[in-house]
Amino acid sequence: MGRAPRVVGRVRTGAVVVTGDFRRYLYPRDHPRLADVRGLTAAEYARVASRPGTFTGGLVAGWTPLYRRPFRGVTENGTLRRDVHPLTPAAPSEAAPVAAMVDAAEALLTILDADDRERLCHEVDAVEWQTWANPEFLQFDTGIRLERTTDAVRGAVLELVRASLSSDGYDSVRNTMRINGFLGETVDLPTILGEWSYNVALYGRPHLTEPWGWQLFGHHLAVNCLVVDGRMTIGPVFLGAEPDQIDAGPHAGVRTLGRHTAAMRTVMAALDPAQRDRATVYRTMVDPAMPPGRVHPGDERHLAGAFQDNRVIPFEGVRVADTTEAAEHAVLDAVAAFLHLLPDGPRRTALRDIAAHLDETWFCWIGGHGEQDVFYARIQSPVILVEVDHHCGVFLDYDEPKPFHVHTVLRVPHGNDYGRAWVRHRRQSPSPHS
């Protein structure tokens, strides 16, 4: 996140051309885009990024007031449905690993000093949940910053993430952090783009049945995890990468987000030509038919990112129930790809809830649908919203979306982002185990 995408063609201006897909777009090391911020700490860079009159300052000014608005949740029409997120205790075979999570959280709390414990911990429905953001600049310094703490604390935080997520999901989180560090090394901005340039916070008191959770966020990564009565939700989730691969060093070969883009392409391929045409709401990534503001200077095409907790996002494209059986299966497979962070039991529960609303599920697309085309795609129902969007360059030099810069978003519409609907249910019907 660092400059507005241009919406017209361009002439290349001095990028260093080397081998590899993304390496063709490296800025010269002394380019002002890099040189002007090189060496700044996260706090110093945050002050620079928030200056009025700058591109990033405009983003900060627009986003800052949004998180304090009373939380309702993303909806398709502005009307909140309170019937789609009932809270029933999880069956043992589908329960979240809460005991292991509690142990990991308590181990983290034990090694923190009093000041860091106070910074880390918030009420379970605190507004601080909503301060997460995915740009590289630190807009809200919520919780504790991993780059400013000890190896022991960082290790304890990772153990909490590991205890909570599937092994595949944990790997995705770690690889996203590693790719961020790789980007920082590649463009020589390690103090801004680092493996530990992330914040972590706890919400509620770790407990076997009562609601509590944790949050990890920073550049191209946000996970908000809440558990209650053995149930788990992980929305909102943001996973992104620029580039989406590491091609050198000890983690060479690491890639992220390929499953997300491939799954959306599979849905598109499963539609017949008429359905594909209905699903395509705009033919190009920046289309003259788009209304003003449809391409946001920071979010580009995706609609449900940071600070969009109450956004009205109408259904668009084609209703999945009106497509082919193959497309219905592809949609469920795509949603499962986005839910890979969840452990097996909670993932099965979530997929069952999503399948129950398949007749209210819509799929839409922006861009071309050839194998090499960049695109935006969204699957949306009353209980899930997932997006993929290819983006323009931020720390690499290109002004049209590229396949190796990907943003993905997962939301739980109608009020269960951050588990808020479940927290409300718990307060109305206290647990007999509390």
Image: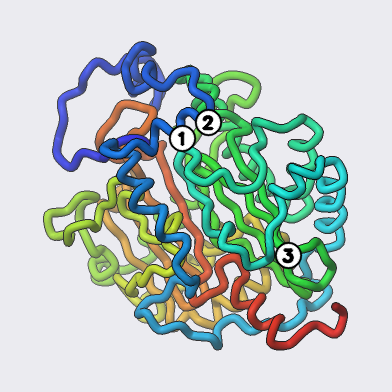
Question: Given the image, on which type of amino acid does mark 2 rest?
Answer: Ala
Question: Given the image, on which type of amino acid does mark 3 rest?
Answer: Trp
Tell me if label 2 and label 1 are in contact, CB under 8 Å: yes
Can you give x and y, in whole percent of width and height, for residue 316 in the image? 30, 71
Instruction: Measure the alpha-carbon separation of dots 3 and 1.
Output: 29 Å
The quarter of the image holding the C terminus is: bottom right
Kindly indicate the quadrant of the structure image that contains residue 233. Answer: bottom right
Question: Given the image, on which type of amino acid does mark 1 rest?
Answer: Ala
Marking on residue 42:
2
Please state the total of marks drawn on the protein image: 3
Q: Is residue 152 left or right of residue 83?
A: right
Looking at the rendered image, the disc whose residue lies closer to the viewer, 2 or 3, is 2
* Residue at 33%, 34% in the rendered image: 393
Using the rendered image of the protein, determine whether residue 359 is visible from the camera's viewpoint: yes
Q: Is residue 307 above or below residue 255?
A: below
* Residue at 82%, 48% in the rendered image: 109
Q: Residues within 10 Å of mark 1 (few under 14, many from 20)?
A: many
